[in-house]
Image: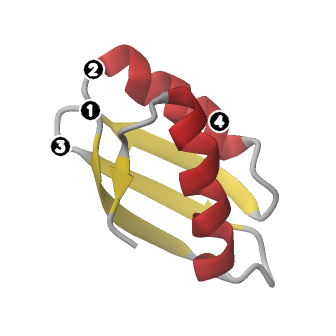
């Protein structure tokens, strides 16, 4: 399953770091963060609960950029 989320990220470098971090979260198959459109597209592994996974993604992304926001 693939979902797109609206995000707030301050710079392209932070967007790249958030993308790399998101890909390491259990339950995430792939992730793409587009700084220009302020969107994150996440493909979840089969059987993963998107809400639970995205809570972990948000925690992980806040380690990269403490003020980042993801509209869940």
- Answer yes or no: do the residues labelled 1 and 3 have beta carbons within 8 Å? yes
Check the picture and name the quadrant holding the C terminus: bottom left
Check the picture and name the quadrant holding the N terminus: bottom right
Find numbered disc 2 in the image and state the secondary structure of the residue it sits on.
loop
State the residue position of label 3.
37
Q: How far apart are marks 3 and 2 (CA)?
A: 12 Å
Q: In this view, does 69 lie above or below 54?
A: above
54 lies left or right of 53: left
Residue drawn at x 23%, y 44% is 38
Q: Earlier in the sequence, mark 3 or mark 4?
A: 4
- Answer yes or no: do the residues labelled 3 and 4 have beta carbons within 8 Å? no
Expressed as whole percent of the image width and height from the top left, the position of residue 49 reads 70, 83
Residue 21 numbered mark, or none? 4
- Answer yes or no: do the residues labelled 1 and 2 have beta carbons within 8 Å? yes
20 lies left or right of 10: right
State the residue position of label 1.
35
Q: Nearer the viewer, mark 1 or mark 2?
A: 2
Q: Is residue 48 above or below residue 55?
A: below
Q: Distance between the residues labelled 1 and 3?
A: 6 Å
């Amino acid at each position: 399953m693939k979902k797109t989320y609206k995000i707030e990220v301050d710079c392209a470098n932070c967007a790249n770091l958030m993308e790399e971090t998101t890909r390491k979260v259990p339950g995430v198959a792939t992730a793409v963060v587009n700084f220009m459109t302020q969107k994150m597209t996440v493909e979840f592994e089969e059987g993963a609960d998107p809400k639970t996974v995205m809570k972990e993604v948000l925690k992980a992304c806040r380690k990269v950029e403490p003020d980042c926001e993801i509209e869940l």
